[in-house]
Image (cartoon, grey):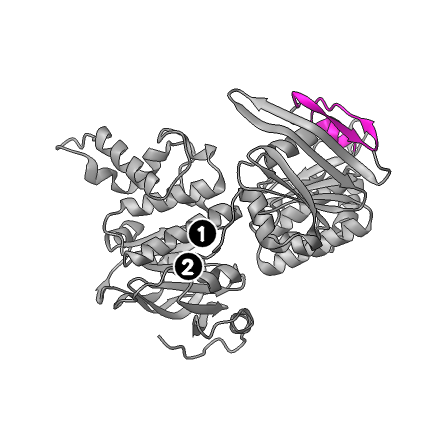
C-alpha cells in the first residue's frame, strides 16, 4: 500500500438474500484528498459506504486503514478508527439542542455526570471552525437543512474523524448553500481530512474532487483523474451507454393557451404572480432560495390558501379551495419532496398509482374496489414511464430516487383529465441516466399537448428543456425570456434583481 493512501478496499463483495449488492469492487483514498464516488441509483454506493463504516460486513475482500487490515464489527469500531459518515437523510433529534446532537453517544462525563458547559464550549468551537451562524444551544429542529448538515459535519469532527463520507450532501441545498458546503469541504481538505464525496451532480465533482471512482450495477468500473475525463465519457462509464442528447426535447407545435394564473398573492410569500402556459409548451420557472416558486403553486393547487388571484384552464376561470378541486380541473402537481408528499412509501407501486382515481374505479353503492382493473391500469401507467420494478406490489420505498419519481409521474398520468403538469424539482437527487429518462417523458407529454411547468434550480435543466422561462425573486415575477434569448447569466441577473416589479411579456 502506497504511503499516501489512508484507505484501501480490495475485492469487496456483499451479498444480501438473492442480491449481490457489491461484486468485487475496489477503492483507494489518499490523505487530504476529496475523492468523488459516482454511479446510478442502485449501483452499490450506499452499500459500499455501509461496509466502510461497519454497518455491513463484506463476505469477501479486504479493507486497509493506514496500511493495516481492519475488520469492523459495527459503526462504533469505524468511528473509533476515525471514519464518519454524513448521510443524505441524517438521523437527527429535532427536540434536542445542537450540542446534544453533536455529542449523542459520546457525551463528556465526569463521575457519571454530563459536563454541559464543556460540551457547549466544544460544540461552539466546532461550529466556529465551520463558520456556522447559529448557537450550540439552539434546537436542532429549528435549523435549516443546510444548518442541520453542518451539525452533522461538526458531529463527525467531534469524533476526530480523519475520513468523512458525504452522501449526496448538496441534493437538498440551494445554490448558495452548496457554495458554503464547498467552502467547508475545501477547508477540511486543507486541514488534512480525507473526504469521500458521493453525488449525482457533475458540478459537485468538478468543483471539489481530484479523482472520481465509478460503480455500475454493483461493480467497479474505474477510477479517473477529474481533469482528464470528459463529461460524455464519465456518463458512459456510469450508465453503460452513450447518452447523445441529455435534454431530449422534441420539436412541438405550440398550441393555444391552456393555463393562466393572474395576480396570485399571499402575504409574506408571493405577490401579483401572473404567468401562462400553452398546449405542448414547457415553461420553466427558476429563482433563488425564498423566491416563492413552490409556495405559489401550492396555493394554485389548493394546498395553501392565497389572499388573491385567479386561475384559468382552457380560458375558463376555475375556483380551487382544496387539492381535489385542482385535480378535477386537470391541474396536477408533482411535489418537490416525492418521499414525503408524492408517495406513500410503505404502499405498493400499484396502490400509489391508482390512489387519485380509486373512487372512480369503485363500483356499486358500497364502493367495492375493482382490483383487477386497478392492477391493469397501474401496470399500464408504470410501463408507460418505464419504471424499473419487479412487480406492482413492490413497496415504493424499495425503488431508487429516479424510479420513485417515475411512479409519481405515472400517478399523474392516471388522472385521465390532466391538462397541466407542474413538476417541482423533478430530478432532485436523481442520477444522470434517470434524469435523461425523465426529460424524455416530459418531451413525450409535451408532444401529446399537455402544458408543463418545470420548477427548477438547475440552470442546465431549465435551459435544456424549456420553451419559455420565468424568473422569480422575493415572491415576484422578475422576467420572462424566450429560450432563444435565455442564457444562464441573464437568468441569474433576473433572479437576483432588486426591483422585483418588472413588466413581463406573455
Q: Residue at x 60, y 45 (%)?
A: 168
Magenta region, residue range: 58-81
The residue tagged 2 is 454
Q: Quadrant of the C terminus?
A: bottom left
Left or right, 283 with respect to 171, comes to left
Question: Is 50 one of the magenta-colored residues?
Answer: no
Q: Residue at 50% across / 68% down in the picture?
A: 474
> Callout 2: helix, strand or loop?
strand
Disc 1 to disc 2, C-alpha distance:
8 Å
Q: Which residue is mark 1?
A: 426
Q: Nearer the viewer, residue 351 or 441?
A: 441
* In contact (CB < 8 Å): disc 1 and disc 2: yes
Q: Residue furthest left?
A: 365
Q: Secondary structure at mark 1?
A: loop
The location of residue 82, given as percent across then percent down, is: 78, 35
Q: Is residue 340 visible?
A: no
Amino acid at each position: 500500500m502506497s504511503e499516501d493512501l489512508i484507505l484501501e478496499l480490495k475485492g469487496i463483495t456483499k451479498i444480501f438474500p438473492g442480491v449481490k449488492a457489491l461484486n468485487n469492487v475496489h477503492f483507494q483514498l489518499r490523505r487530504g484528498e476529496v475523492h468523488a464516488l459516482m454511479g446510478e441509483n442502485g449501483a452499490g454506493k450506499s452499500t459500499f459506504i455501509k461496509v466502510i463504516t461497519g454497518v455491513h460486513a463484506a463476505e469477501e475482500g479486504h479493507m486497509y486503514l493506514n496500511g493495516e487490515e481492519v475488520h469492523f464489527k459495527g459503526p462504533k469500531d469505524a468511528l473509533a478508527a476515525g471514519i464518519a459518515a454524513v448521510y443524505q437523510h441524517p438521523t437527527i433529534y429535532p427536540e434536542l439542542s445542537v450540542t446534544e446532537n453533536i455529542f449523542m453517544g459520546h457525551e463528556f462525563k465526569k463521575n457519571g455526570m454530563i459536563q454541559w458547559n464543556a460540551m457547549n464550549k466544544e460544540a461552539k468551537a466546532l461550529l466556529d471552525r465551520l463558520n456556522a451562524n447559529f448557537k450550540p444551544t439552539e434546537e436542532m429542529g429549528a435549523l435549516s437543512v443546510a444548518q442541520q448538515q453542518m451539525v452533522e459535519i461538526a458531529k463527525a469532527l467531534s469524533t476526530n474523524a480523519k475520513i468523512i463520507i458525504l452522501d449526496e450532501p448538496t441534493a437538498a441545498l440551494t445554490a448558495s448553500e452548496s457554495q458554503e458546503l464547498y467552502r467547508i469541504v475545501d477547508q477540511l481538505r486543507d486541514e488534512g481530512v480525507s473526504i469521500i464525496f458521493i453525488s449525482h451532480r457533475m458540478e459537485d465533482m468538478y468543483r471539489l474532487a481530484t479523482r472520481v471512482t465509478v460503480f455500475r450495477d454493483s461493480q467497479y468500473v474505474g477510477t479517473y483523474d477529474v481533469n482528464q475525463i470528459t463529461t460524455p465519457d464519465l456518463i458512459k462509464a456510469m450508465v453503460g451507454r452513450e447518452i447523445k442528447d441529455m435534454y431530449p426535447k422534441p420539436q412541438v407545435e405550440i398550441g393555444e393557451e391552456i393555463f393562466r394564473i393572474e395576480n396570485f398573492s399571499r402575504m409574506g410569500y408571493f405577490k401579483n404572480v401572473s404567468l401562462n402556459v400553452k398546449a405542448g409548451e414547457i415553461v420553466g420557472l427558476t429563482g433563488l432560495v425564498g423566491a416563492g416558486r413552490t409556495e405559489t403553486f401550492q396555493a394554485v393547487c389548493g394546498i395553501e390558501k392565497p389572499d388573491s388571484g385567479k386561475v384559468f384552464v382552457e380560458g375558463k376561470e376555475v375556483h380551487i379551495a382544496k387539492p381535489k378541486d385542482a385535480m378535477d380541473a386537470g391541474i396536477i402537481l408533482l411535489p418537490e419532496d416525492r418521499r414525503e408528499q408524492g408517495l406513500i412509501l410503505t404502499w405498493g407501486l400499484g396502490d400509489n398509482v391508482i390512489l387519485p382515481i380509486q373512487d372512480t374505479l369503485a363500483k356499486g353503492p358500497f364502493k367495492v374496489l375493482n382490483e383487477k382493473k386497478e392492477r391493469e391500469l397501474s401496470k399500464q401507467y408504470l410501463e408507460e414511464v418505464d419504471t424499473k420494478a419487479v412487480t406492482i406490489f413492490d413497496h415504493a420505498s424499495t425503488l431508487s430516487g429516479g424510479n420513485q419519481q417515475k411512479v409519481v409521474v405515472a400517478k399523474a398520468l392516471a388522472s385521465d383529465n390532466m391538462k397541466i403538469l407542474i413538476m417541482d424539482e423533478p430530478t432532485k437527487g436523481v442520477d444522470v441516466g434517470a434524469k435523461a429518462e425523465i426529460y424524455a417523458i416530459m418531451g413525450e407529454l409535451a408532444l401529446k399537448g399537455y402544458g408543463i411547468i418545470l420548477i427548477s434550480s438547475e440552470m442546465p435543466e431549465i435551459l435544456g428543456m424549456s420553451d419559455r422561462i420565468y424568473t422569480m425573486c422575493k415572491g415576484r415575477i422578475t422576467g420572462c425570456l424566450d429560450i432563444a434569448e435565455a442564457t444562464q447569466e441573464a437568468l441569474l441577473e433576473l433572479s437576483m434583481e432588486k426591483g422585483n416589479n418588472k413588466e413581463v411579456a406573455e
